Image (cartoon, rainbow, N blue to C red):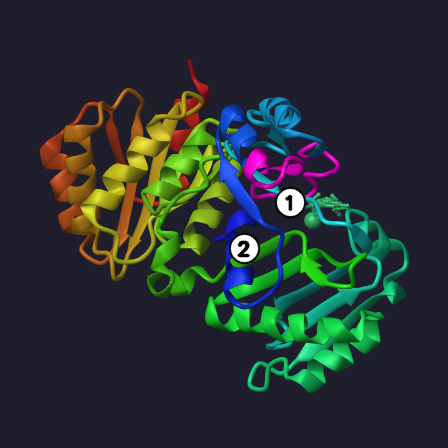
Amino acid sequence: MDLYEHQARELFAEHGIVVPRAEVTDSPAGAREIARRLGGRAVVKAQVKTGGRGKAGGVRLAADPAEAEATARRILGMDIKGHRVGTVMLAEPVDVEHEFYVSYVLDRAAGRFLAIASAEGGTEIEEVAATRPEAVARIPIDPAVGVTSAKAAEIAAAAGLPTQSADVLVRLWQVLVREDALLVEANPLVRTRQGRIVALDGKVTLDDNSRFRQARWGDAPDTGRADPLEAAAAERGLNYVRLDGEVGVIGNGAGLVMSTLDVVARCGARPANFLDIGGGASAQVMADGLTVILSDPAVRSVLVNVFGGITACDAVADGIVRALDTVRLTRPLVVRLDGNNAARGRAILDDRAHPLVHQATTMDDAARRAAHLATAH
Ligand code: GDP
Ligand code: MN
């Protein structure tokens, strides 16, 4: 899960990294109040979980509280790369002398972390990395050792960061370790005209596997998420991706779902989504999955393709029957059950005898029928 800038800022502050004074609001009037508390001038910053806010006009300096209010009014509700701005953070402006870039990322292939740092930080960092890779230092970090003072000094020297930034480099690493993050980034990390090192912008991605240890962030979904159906699915803990076709696809296991998408495409139809109910799926998960898929008006038929393993087919069939009690089925459902307890699962669906539920015994046959139902008139 990605954190908002204001949440990352909070973590940085807790770990002793200097950040600008700041507060968050969802209203222009609130922005005026905050600017007043900050001393009048304020940087108004869109809170969305995507980068490039500055270039999109989502980061603006306001000279006084009235201008902060007007600026917040402009930024709130803006669309930045598909993310709607619901809140703004107002920060005390910092007198920037130089902008640096620093991040720690997990390098899965190498089984290590990587420090990426540059003396040319700021909004053009992607451009710098693409055109002059030598201006960006990449230093491997042994996760068992971490970023010691010596390592921090090595990173600072390699990237041309000021010696005094070494302390911040150690603290950013502590954020990564203690907060269970996969990515910690400060861009820009700045040296102010007063000679202080300040993190002006922060990005933190938490490891979802440790959500139970990081309960303070809750399960709050990203309300600014572009696709409302994906947001609804995420709220229910479903692994769902919306596509632009007409056949809804539900399966258990990412591999099976992906093959199902391929088979649907081969039958001349287009998948409307990817939905993996996973292993050990309950009737509730099935009901939730069907609810989400049927909320998509583009869906003209639904294909359920389950190979029973840990999730037995009778449990899936129970889930479908239960879903039929809570969801009004308006489009045909083609079900293929195979594997563990397949016969029992099929019998459960036969007993329910819903006119819109069709059963198929092979994946190819099921895909053919779902594709036909979706494309025929
Ligand atoms: P991003 O575009 O989403 O990465 O948003 P940032 O928070 O990084 O802001 C973009 C740019 O705005 C930074 O690189 C700075 O150049 C500038 N900026 C943001 N806050 C301040 C500030 O307090 N003072 C100054 N001088 N520049 C700022
Ligand atoms: Mn930034």
The C terminus is located in which quarter?
top left
Three-letter code, disc 1: Glu
Does dot 1 land on a helix, a strand or a loop?
Answer: loop
Q: Are there few (<14), some (14-19), or many (20+) residues within 10 Å of tag 2?
A: many
Q: Quadrant of residue 52?
A: top right
Relative to residue 333, is residue 377 drawn left or right?
right
* Residue drawn 21% across the image and 56% down it: 312
Disc 1 residue: CB within 8 Å of ligand 1: yes
Q: Residue 19, percent across and down? A: 62, 56
Quickly name the residue at label 1.
92
Relative to residue 341, is residue 98 drawn left or right?
right
Q: State the CA–CA distance, disc 2 to disc 1.
A: 16 Å
User: Pointers 2 and 1 in contact (CB under 8 A)?
Assistant: no
Report the magenta residues as a range.
35-60
Q: Nearer the viewer, residue 297 or 250?
A: 297
* Residue drawn 35% across the image and 42% down it: 235
- The secondary structure making up most of the magenta span is loop
Q: Residue 93, percent across and down? A: 69, 44
Q: Nearer the viewer, residue 256 or 350?
A: 256
Relative to residue 264, is residue 151 drawn left or right?
right
Quickly name the residue at label 2.
8
